[in-house]
Image (cartoon, helix red, strand yellow):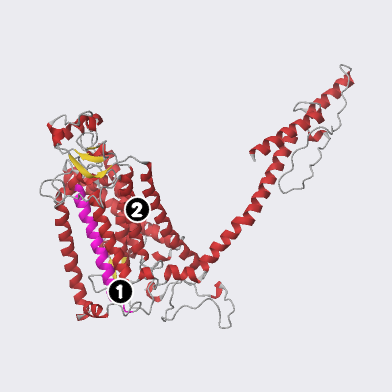
Amino acid sequence: GLESFIVSAVWGVGAAGAVGGGGLGGKSSSSSSKRAASSGSMPAVPVAAADPQVPQPPCVDGEDKEPRPVDPSPTMAGGRSIMDAIAQRIRGVKESADRTHKAYIKPVKRAVREEFKSERMKSLLCSPYVFWRHPIARIFIVWIILVEDFFIYGEDPVNDSRVRANFPGMGHILGLITLHTADSVGLGFLKFFLVLVAFIVGFALGRLFLVRIIRARWKVVAFEGCEGAILTVSLFITGMLMLCSLLYNVMIPSDAEALGGHSMDIFLLFGAKTLQYRHVNKNFQTLSGSVDLLAILMVMDQVLQDNHWYPNFAPYTKKFWLAYNGWVRIIAFWVLLIGGIAICAVGVSGTGTEPGEVTWNNKILGGTSEVTRGILAACIVFTDLFTVAQDWAFPTFRDNLEIEVPKIAGTAVETLRISWMVSLIEYCPPLPESVRKWMPPADFFQLSFTGKWLTYGPLIGVMIIDLFCTKTQLMYNPSDYGQYVDPFDNCIMLIVDEDYLNIAYSEDGTLVDESMITWEARWNATTGQALSASALTDIKLNSKYVDSSVKYFGLILALVFIAIFVATIMITNYRLRKGLPVDMYEEDGSPIASPRDAQGAETSPASLPSPLKPTVRETQ
């Protein structure tokens, strides 16, 4: 297109020169020559006729193949001929783009739109009877998350580092809520005030975003009624805590300790021996394993409460699980959860590279590089999202009115409500009328959520942590963690001499002297002998580092999985806007029929009931 445009412009200039007597000022030159002729200073130069030997401008695609003759009038001369050539070329490009859109783009869009409307898409998205939503598949996948989580914990070399942990962002937030680490009572009170402001403002902004944007504007059906508040409020509170931590650093005096990625003192309260990566990450892994166990028990509880979708699955187990008015399931849930968390905490605390600790040295499954670990982290993101998609009410999360709503695991209620903020507001002194009219009602600060969001909300939180794990693998550099690479087999070498590390790193875990954390600084490159007694204590880990750009493939995979998950929800909303059914069953429990009347005639979407209209239960 650019080449054709240049050719057209050049031919236009050439034609102008031939018509107007040369140069870019054809018309002006003709006028000036006439004036000169009349004054007698020079003879008049007649206007040249169109030369048949002058090449004609090329024709535009899609137009007649006959070239257009050049207008011999002076109006074609100079800048006008160039502009005509440009406009002509633009028209040709536009016509070509229109033909391409009609021939290729429009049919694809039409096919995708029809696929979204098809019964097959409804069955794929919402049918509880697809094989990957069978109770066995649901229980199996949620157990896979736990296995993947512990596998990557054993393979990640960061979990063995003897350097002080430094997590920017996370350290800022945890340092702010750790009130006792403030340098003075005044700064401790400042922390408390900022945390209180972060919770109140984050709560209000999260609720406003949920009501005004997600529900009112985007109309995401999964967030209808009381759903989704726990997720949006948690995200906004986290963001406000981060903002308040930065504000704290601005407000404190210069001699006070600022918050940073190294502010991990809260883990000392949970049993961490030091603030090194190896001890801090044990707490993270215990938390992650506990959330995985919670998800396992909640999914199992939901499956064993079901008597509608799969009534013939494990009938005797269901009968025992629901015996004594549900007290068996309540007691069993808490016993299994507390016992599982205790076993997880004890097991994780016994891992490490110290003598007597459990070390992962499997060479068959292990020995992965940062590329494999990044892909594995992406697979954990996939299994987290797939567990959410396996729910029988996904992607609407609206339970049928004729189906008994499962109770929240470990309780005898269907919905959990948090209304202490409402009670607090009611006991506060009344505000002036001029202020009250700008304030939301008291029940705005009440949180209500069902068991589904209690199950999948923490899983989404773990998924965010897994994304950070993927980022860690992408940005992993052994020298940042007191490690270096053996050039012979690419295995990672761990420095355990803490006195040596204290020289190479600052107090907050930042690398000061990179030359000390290399193979050449620890071993003789020719003989392979240790250069010091400190080097003899270094430990060769099972993991490897290959420094390959393929490691970014894991991040791409994770983003693709998230995009597919979001697209699934958007497809559901598209079907809702078009008045198409998204649930497999009507409110009376009968299967949803195709949108046709009894005579087989197509029913218009406008005649179908609006799926966005709240039901009686949602209104209550």
The residue positioned farthest toward the top in the image shown: 41
| Residue to which mark 1 is pinned | 406
Q: Residue at x 42, y 66 (%)?
A: 221
- Residue 301's place in the image compared with 168, above or below, is below
Q: Quadrant of residue 142?
A: bottom left
Residue 453 place in picture, x, y as percent: 32, 64
- Residue 311's place in the image compared with 549, above or below, is below
The residue positioned farthest toward the bottom in the image shown: 598
Position of residue 566 in the picture relative to residue 253 (left or right): right
In the image, which is nearer the foreground, mark 1 or mark 2? Answer: 2
Question: Quadrant of the image for the N terminus?
Answer: top right
Q: Residue at x 28, y 61 (%)?
A: 144
Residue 418 place in picture, x, y as percent: 27, 65
Q: Quadrant of residue 436?
A: bottom left
Residue 498 place in picture, x, y as percent: 14, 37
Q: Residue at x 15, y 60 (%)?
A: 343
Question: Is residue 444 in view from this perspective?
Answer: no
Question: Is residue 574 in view from this perspective?
Answer: yes
Pick the front one: 108 or 421: 108
Residue 610 is a magenta residue:
no
**Magenta range:** 280-307
Main SS, magenta region, reads helix
Q: Crowding at label 2, few (<14), some or many (≥20) Cα neighbours within 10 Å?
A: many
> Between marks 1 and 2, how big is the CA–CA gap?
31 Å
Q: Amino acid at mark 2?
A: Ala
Sequence-earlier tag: 1 or 2 = 2
Any mark on residue 378, and which?
2
Q: Secondary structure at mark 1?
A: loop
